[in-house]
Image: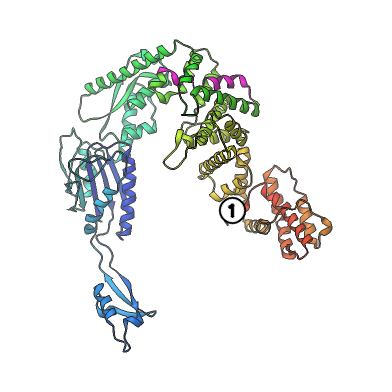
């Protein structure tokens, strides 16, 4: 069983680059080996801050032998009148290094069959590995020494082993060998890898856990054990865990502490200082934050006094700053910061943050009325929702906007629902986080986000794959998730119009802007739901109605469409409605049906069947049952009736009848969009 090992040893890599590099390496090796017809069973990727490694298992020793055919000149040119090869044919053979006996005539052309011997994998690796390394992409790539090659960090060593043989190549001035390096503080400065099987074990003896998954499990296990020693609980944040995993090779937990007086500041501030700014795991007891934390050191040794002292000194300084900011900020009530927002620009040409707050208030009032919600707490939340932006603490810890506003609101004597709404109006913070639970947070959050989206498009700014001004994609996702998850009956189409009318700039074509914003939101809606519903179902439900006017209706119809298309007899349903759609697609709609113009009994049967389906039918399950029941009637109609009758009045009457039928199906979806 052949194995190939590649290790690229570097100076400390940026932690955000490592998971991306791992994915790129797996993708590129898989693609390149398959293109070169080299068989393998698995590709494993290992990574630490100082190395990226690839282990390919069951890799074939060489390519399979094969053959290929080459097309030559047309037979009339390749052969003379006597059937002998011409100079053109011989030239073709010489150019492609083909023996004359391997030439043959087929389909009036000269052909040649070439037998190809498979190359040895080691030869191919020598060529492809430097190319794959060179293809890696990421931010902040650099050059070093006098090299033209760029990489994330300087390359210091390369291991390249096919079983126990070194596969020689050179990259960035470094020749591949079988020598790697252990942890910076390990006693084993250089390690010889005899074969790929011993790679992980030898590195671990040199204080390097190369397997990122194992390293992550080790961090969790050791951190929990360390917390247990002091009867504390640790909450593992996955984002922080990933970051620590990629900045350590040999993780060792160390318990540190700080003065209890710093627990007086908002808990979110202390946790942010520890987890976000310093990469520490906060510790809790009975759900309350302790004045202790765990730092994960990347260290080999038995004494950690210096590590403990250094981390405690750093966190104390940060917490001391936070205490000072809180003391300064809370000398004034939160409402007093409102006027300061006049000096903070929202966006150039779009007014100040104070102006934005006023617009949020207008939109919130409209939403509160639409939802029949008490406006007092909503109005106060809208007024104060951005006030914390001008506090010293938020200026220093921008990621805490909203959380600080909530804390300061409570300190200022504001109602709990107002304080909570200030915090929640920023929710959801990302694609996976929760939406606002309070009506204040929901309404003010939607108002804030729709104002931001409208402002971006009103200013003529573009949203593309690489550009997301003011995070409008996240804002759109937040609006849609908040409405859907909380079952809010909000007409977004109407809200967009109000938001446009309140923009502080002249808008020459409001209708065009309205359409742009609506299209953007519908596209984000379809993308958001694409993991749960097939794309054609989403398109079918979005095409026939203003989905933004009633998102609950849209979600109901998605489930109904999915159930309709899953039925065993959907083929008849699909054909019936799509036949109607194809016939009347380019015809104008005739509003009335004259029963006196019916010629066939099938016309009357279809008309009577469709009349039994109420125009006000809102129960989609009942509507679906009724539509399925008239499918045989529609089929019989098409079997016995020619819609495009020579008599214009009869034809128009039949088209009007089909339009009435189509309207019933349109209440659910545009079934022409369904792929079947």
Rendered residue at 76%/56% (across/down): 606
Q: Nearer the viewer, residue 405 or 627?
A: 405
Secondary structure under badge 1? loop
The answer to whether residue 498 of the structure is visible from this angle is yes
Image coordinates of residue 392 in percent, x first then y, are: 40, 17
The answer to whether residue 288 of the structure is visible from this angle is no
Q: How many marks?
A: 1
Q: Would you call the spot at circle 1 few (<14 residues within 10 Å), some (14-19), or many (20 or more)? A: some
Rendered residue at 20%/40% (across/down): 144
Can you name the residue that lies furthest to the bottom here? 82
Q: In terms of image quadrants, where is residue 226?
A: top left
Q: Answer above or below: position of 429 versus 63.
A: above
Q: In terms of image quadrants, where is residue 111?
A: bottom left
Q: In terms of image quadrants, where is residue 466?
A: top left
Can you name the residue that lies furthest to the right here? 596
Would residue 623 be found to the left or right of residue 46 on screen?
right
Can you name the residue that lies furthest to the top here? 331
Rendered residue at 17%/41% (across/down): 145
Q: Which residues are magenta?
A: 373-392
Q: Nearer the viewer, residue 288 or 424?
A: 424
Image coordinates of residue 668 in percent, x first then y, are: 65, 47
Would residue 524 be found to the left or right of residue 78 on screen?
right
Q: Nearer the viewer, residue 674 or 215?
A: 674
């Amino acid at each position: 069983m052949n194995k190939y090992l590649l290790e690229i040893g570097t100076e400390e890599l940026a932690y955000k680059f490592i998971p991306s590099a791992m994915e790129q390496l797996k993708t590129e090796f898989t693609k390149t080996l398959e293109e070169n017809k080299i068989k393998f069973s698995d590709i494993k990727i290992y990574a630490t801050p100082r190395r990226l490694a690839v282990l390919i298992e069951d890799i074939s020793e060489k390519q399979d032998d094969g053959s290929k055919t080459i097309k030559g000149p047309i037979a009339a040119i390749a052969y003379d009148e006597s059937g002998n090869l011409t100079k053109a044919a011989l030239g073709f053979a010489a150019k492609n290094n083909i023996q004359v006996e391997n030439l043959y005539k087929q389909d009036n052309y000269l052909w040649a069959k070439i037998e190809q011997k498979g190359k040895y994998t080691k030869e191919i690796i020598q060529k492809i590995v430097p190319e794959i390394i060179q293809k890696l992409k990421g931010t902040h790539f650099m050059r070093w020494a006098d090299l033209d090659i760029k990489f994330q960090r300087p390359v210091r060593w390369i291991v390249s082993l096919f079983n126990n043989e070194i596969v020689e190549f050179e990259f960035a001035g470094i020749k591949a060998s079988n020598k790697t390096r252990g942890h910076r503080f390990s006693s084993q400065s250089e390690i010889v890898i005899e074969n790929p099987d011993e790679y992980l074990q030898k590195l671990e003896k040199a204080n390097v856990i190369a397997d990122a998954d194992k390293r992550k499990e080790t961090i969790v296990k050791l951190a929990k054990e360390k917390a247990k020693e002091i009867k504390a609980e640790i909450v593992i944040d996955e984002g922080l865990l990933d970051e620590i995993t990629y900045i350590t090779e040999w993780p060792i937990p160390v318990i540190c502490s700080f003065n209890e007086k710093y627990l007086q500041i908002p808990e979110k501030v202390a946790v942010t200082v520890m987890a976000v700014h310093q990469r520490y795991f906060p510790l809790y007891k009975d759900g309350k934050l302790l004045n202790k934390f765990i730092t994960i050191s990347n260290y080999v040794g038995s004494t950690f006094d210096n590590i403990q002292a250094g981390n405690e000194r750093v966190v104390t300084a940060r917490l001391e700053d936070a205490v000072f900011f809180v003391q300064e900020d809370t000398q004034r009530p939160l409402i007093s910061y409102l006027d300061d927002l006049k000096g903070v620009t929202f966006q150039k040409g779009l007014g100040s943050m104070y102006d934005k707050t006023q617009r949020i208030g207008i939109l919130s009032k409209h939403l509160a009325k639409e939802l029949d919600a008490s406006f007092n707490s909503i109005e106060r939340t809208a007024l104060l929702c951005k006030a914390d932006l001008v506090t010293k603490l938020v200026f220093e810890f921008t990621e805490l906007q909203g959380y600080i506003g909530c804390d300061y609101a409570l300190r200022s004597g504001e109602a709990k629902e107002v304080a909570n709404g200030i915090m929640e109006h920023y929710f959801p913070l990302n694609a996976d986080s929760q939406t606002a639970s309070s009506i204040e947070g929901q309404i003010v959050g939607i108002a804030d986000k729709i104002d931001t989206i409208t402002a971006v498009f009103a200013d003529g700014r573009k949203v593309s794959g690489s550009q997301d001004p003011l995070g409008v994609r996240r804002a759109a996702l937040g609006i849609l998730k908040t409405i859907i998850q909380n079952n809010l009956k909000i007409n977004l189409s109407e809200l967009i119009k109000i938001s446009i009318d309140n923009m502080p700039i002249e808008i020459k074509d409001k209708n065009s802007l309205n359409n742009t914003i609506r299209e953007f939101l519908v596209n984000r809606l379809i993308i958001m739901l694409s993991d749960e519903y097939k794309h054609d179902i989403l398109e079918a439900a979005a095409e026939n109605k203003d989905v933004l006017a009633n998102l609950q209706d849209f979600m109901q119809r998605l489930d109904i469409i999915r159930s309709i298309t899953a039925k065993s007899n959907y083929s008849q349903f699909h054909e019936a409605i799509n036949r109607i759609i194809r016939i009347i697609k380019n015809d104008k709609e005739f509003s009335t049906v004259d029963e006196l113009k019916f010629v066939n009994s099938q016309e009357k049967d279809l008309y009577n069947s469709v009349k039994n389906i109420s125009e006000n039918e809102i129960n989609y399950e009942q509507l679906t049952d009724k539509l399925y029941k008239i499918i045989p009637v529609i089929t019989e109609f098409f079997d016995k009736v020619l819609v495009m009758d020579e008599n214009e009045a009869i034809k128009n009457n039949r088209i009007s009848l089909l339009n009435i039928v189509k309207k019933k199906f349109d209440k659910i979806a545009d079934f022409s969009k369904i792929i079947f």
